[in-house]
Image: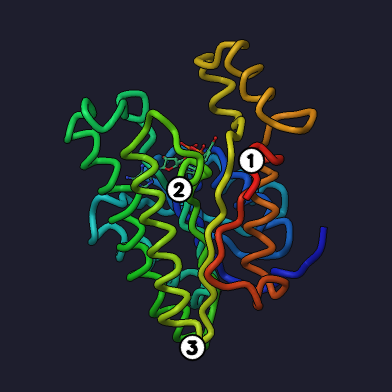
Amino acid sequence: MTDRLKGKGIIVIGAGSGIGAATVRRLASEGARVCVADINDAGARAVADEVSAGGGDAFPVHIDLADEASVQGAVSAAVARLGGLDGAHINAADLGAIMADSDALSVELAVFDRTIQINLRGHLLCTRAVLPHLLARGGGAIVYTTSGACDSAEPVRPAYATSKSGLNALMRHVAARWGREGITSNCVAPGFTLTPEMEASGNLPPALLEQMLAQIPGSRLGRPEDIAGVVAMLLSEDGRWINGQVYHVNGGALMR
Ligand SMILES: NC(=O)c1ccc[n+]([C@@H]2O[C@H](COP(=O)([O-])OP(=O)(O)OC[C@H]3O[C@@H](n4cnc5c(N)ncnc54)[C@H](O)[C@@H]3O)[C@@H](O)[C@H]2O)c1
């Protein structure tokens, strides 16, 4: 592993499990000091403790993307501890209602509204909280987690895909508006990614996993570490000439 993130202060929002947790581990392993922000306090603490026990630098902070004061407070706490901010991975999503995200005719408006509230409005709140600190440093990088669902025209999950497509637009706006001031803004768009929490839930029938694998021109499913590596690159100096892009990371399941 390199030390290309040595000395950088980075907040990962939605870091208590899955892809965000893998990103924290990866960033810390490359030398970053990482704020582990999540609504799931136990998850965030466990990830931070694991990284710290391995010699890395990570600490947990509570954040709720539904609440502007919570978002501002979490970022302020991160900045106070890190002494500034060089990057942000804004990764949180409320996936609790995704099974009820049926189709445009039948999806309950409460499901649609909650999905937009967290996955899109919440990301605007995070953007507003982190950007002034990145600008104060003379520049920095934001990586949002969107989804291949934006481009794969699914017959289900309209709220989810709409929220993530909106996020792609927000990302491009940030790149266009603040690029000249040293900000890079990009999205990573995972395909189906098997997280440890999904595996532990026991909610994934083998037939579904086989179906997912059959969609990939490769020999395995995606893992959180596959996404984390791309996020780390985009947050590092290697990503400084990349701005306004959506990076699909899916083993070739969706080719564009
Ligand atoms: N795993 C996949 O197959 C896949 C595919 C495409 C995109 N994604 C995206 O990747 C990201 C991470 O997903 P994951 O699979 O690791 O799932 P995950 O549920 O493990 O991660 C989501 C995190 O967001 C947090 N969160 C939820 N609501 C929040 C709130 N109100 N405030 C703060 N934090 C909140 C959760 O506690 C959790 O830690 C999400 O944006 C998801 O949409 C995942």
Q: Residue 130, located in which quarter of the rendered image?
A: bottom left
Secondary structure beneath disc 2? loop
The front one of 135 and 168 is 168
> Is the CB–ligand 1 distance for label 1 below 8 Å?
yes
Tell me: 253 left or right of 67.
Answer: right
Lower position in the chain sequence, tag 1 or tag 3: 3
Which three-letter amino acid code belongs to the residue tagged 1? Pro
Residue situated furthest right in the rendering: 1
Tell me: 218 left or right of 210.
Answer: right
Q: Residue 173, located in which quarter of the rendered image?
A: bottom left
Residue depicted at x 55% and y 38% = 18
How far across and down, in percent of the image, does residue 79 sit?
44, 72
- Colour scheme shown: rainbow
Which three-letter amino acid code belongs to the residue tagged 2? Gly
How far across and down, in percent of the image, does residue 77 sit?
39, 65
Point out which mark residue 14 bears.
2
Residue depicted at x 50% and y 40% = 152
**Residue 90 can be seen in this image:** yes
Lower position in the chain sequence, tag 2 or tag 1: 2
Point out which mark residue 224 bears.
1
